[in-house]
Amino acid sequence: MKGKYLLTLLLAGGCYYANAQEKAKPEDTEVYTPVPPEVKPAKKCGDAPSDAIILFDGTNLDQWVMADDRNAAAQWTVEKGILTVNKKVGNIETKKAFTNYQLHIEWRVPANITGTGQGRGNSGVFLASLGKGDGGYELQVLDSYNSKTYTNGMASSIYKQHVPLANPTLKPGEWQVYDVIWTAPVFGTDGKLVSPARVTALFNGVLVQNNVELKGPTQYIGQPSYGQAHGACPIKLQAHGDKSEPLSFRNIWVREL
């Protein structure tokens, strides 16, 4: 009897679900609010859409300061629409701090680049800068075209944390493109981590980091971990201390999310 009773209940439930579905209307699942804001896309692929903040358009460094002295104007070289690293003065970072964002940045190592491994066109995009020096979360910039190094330190790696899914690096002298989605870590009122940072990155149009979870800020030696809580942070570009020829950047913009 119990089996027949259960079967009857199941059949009755199925009939109820079928009748409910028959009575449903298409408009029951239509949503009209909130209305997404209108954004005009760029006419040329890679150019900034209408709601982007232009960080470098080839003319000046008004949006940047020295990372180790935020009262000092950025002192890298701007010439013919291109921003070139000045290794003698150190890192630069944005005046504005960001939380979650979409970033577009283009970079190029010189065609005559010398050196090997990590000493070959080394720089980095720190997706959130944490104070002086190389503090923060680094997306590696490096010549990885037919050049060997440790894979969690090659171009488009989340340095010392995540190996890229592919290596679409173009040869030296050609412009490379990063498109990045940065999701900042969230900390509670007690300073403890609520949710870790995440990164999605495309390198020359190829997905290389797929919503990866970061273990903490970049550590050159040792394991990364979340220490002091923080909020919005500047974006930092690295003047690496290797002896190879300095690389260049152009067309840098960001959309706050």
Image (cartoon, grey):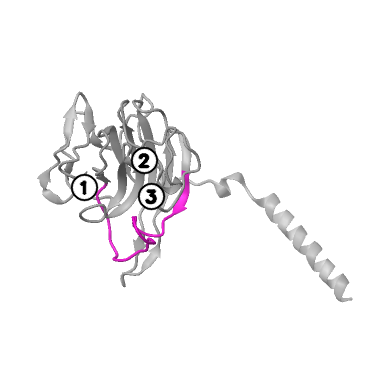
The answer to whether any part of residue 101 appears in the image is no
Please tell me whether residue 198 is drawn above or below residue 52 in the rendered image. below
Which amino acid, mark 3? Tyr
Q: Which residue is mark 3?
A: 159
Which amino acid, mark 1? Lys
Q: Earlier in the sequence, mark 2 or mark 1?
A: 2
Q: Which residue is mark 1?
A: 96
Label 3 SS:
loop
Q: Position of residue 83 (x, y in %)?
A: 22, 32
Alpha-carbon span between mark 3 and mark 1: 24 Å
Which is the main secondary structure of the residues drawn in magenta? Answer: loop
Q: Residue at x 16, y 51 (%)?
A: 68
- Judge the density around disc 3: few (<14), some (14-19), many (≥20) Cα neighbours within 10 Å: many
Q: Position of residue 184 (x, y in %)?
A: 35, 54
Q: Position of residue 133 (x, y in %)?
A: 22, 53
**Badge number at residue 37:** 2
Q: Residue at x 29, y 66 (%)?
A: 228
- Judge the density around disc 2: few (<14), some (14-19), many (≥20) Cα neighbours within 10 Å: few
Magenta-colored span:
209-235
